[in-house]
Amino acid sequence: MPRQIFYTHVMKTGGTSIGRVLQSCFSATEVFPREEGERTTVASKTFSHVLRELDADERAALRLISVHQPAWVAFAVAPDAYKITVLREPVARTISHLRQVRRAPDTPDDIEEIYAIDGWRSRLTNYQTQLFADTEAREAAAATAVDAGAMDESARAELAAGLSQFWRTGISRPMTVGPAELDGAKATLARYDCVGVTSDLPSVVQRIAARTGLELRAVPHANVGDPSIAAPQALIEKITADTEFDRLLYEHAVELAGASG
């Protein structure tokens, strides 16, 4: 049985359901992030430095790590862990993400208006490919100190908007995705021990149980978006065009899931 499980929890893929099944097998002290109030927990799940700055003993005591972070984090902090992730058909995933974002107090109520905002669209365009193509070197190169006190009101507002978008996507600096990024994302995805797809979560749970020896209960359907918020056809067409590389990555995930299944 693997000593540690690392779950790269891609947003709006059914990941909360898998996470809850796994969490039920461990004590609160063995799970990262710990339930410490909603904002603290979400911050730990999203900001990679919180996990990376744990000392060696704290990290070794963890049995399950489940985060909304780029895939490179899994290999940087837990190279020997059993690594799991789940991908979803990209148009459905993006619409579900927009439905979740609209609940935030600082965003428009209309999902088409949200998608028209560059900060959101750039993060949601080929979102899954961005997560798996990103690298630690890219994050390190882009890291800069920010002095909000030295900014004018417009710059502070822009910073706040960017933080809100990062908070709700796990993508701090959006990247433009092309064939090279897709190849990198595919290679990273192939390094995972268990790759699943949202349309077949029970199979994912069965494979995890078989590999880890954990007694896992049936998958609940958790954190479901509001299906009453319809996506206009024009928005669907934009998202379809914007997720060309995510479609190819998803097809690769289907192949990997079938092979491991």
Image (cartoon, grey):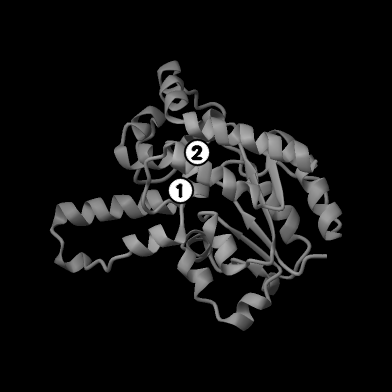
In this picture, residue 106 sits left or right of residue 256: left
Q: Which residue is mark 2?
A: 97
> Residue 133: in sight, yes or no?
yes
Quadrant of the frame with the C terminus: top right
Q: Position of residue 56 (x, y in %)?
A: 60, 81
In this picture, residue 103 sits left or right of residue 189: left
The residue drawn where x is 69% and y is 72% is 30
The residue drawn where x is 74% and y is 44% is 220
> Residue 169 got which mark?
1
In this picture, residue 169 sits left or right of residue 78: left
Q: Name the amino acid type tagged 2.
A: His
Q: Is residue 119 above or below residue 39?
A: above
Tag 1's secondary structure? loop
Judge the density around disc 2: few (<14), some (14-19), many (≥20) Cα neighbours within 10 Å.
some
Q: Is residue 58 above or below residue 100?
A: below
Q: Mark 2 touching mark 1, by CB under 8 A?
A: yes
Image quadrant where residue 145 sits? bottom left
> Residue 178 got which mark?
none
What is the number of callouts on the image? 2
The residue drawn where x is 65% and y is 56% is 7
The residue drawn where x is 46% and y is 56% is 135
Label 2 to label 1, Cα distance in Å? 9 Å
Q: Position of residue 3 (x, y in %)?
A: 76, 69
Who is closer to the viewer here, 179 or 252?
Answer: 179
Who is closer to the viewer here, 230 or 151?
Answer: 151
Who is closer to the viewer here, 178 or 25?
Answer: 178
Q: Position of residue 81 (x, y in %)?
A: 69, 64
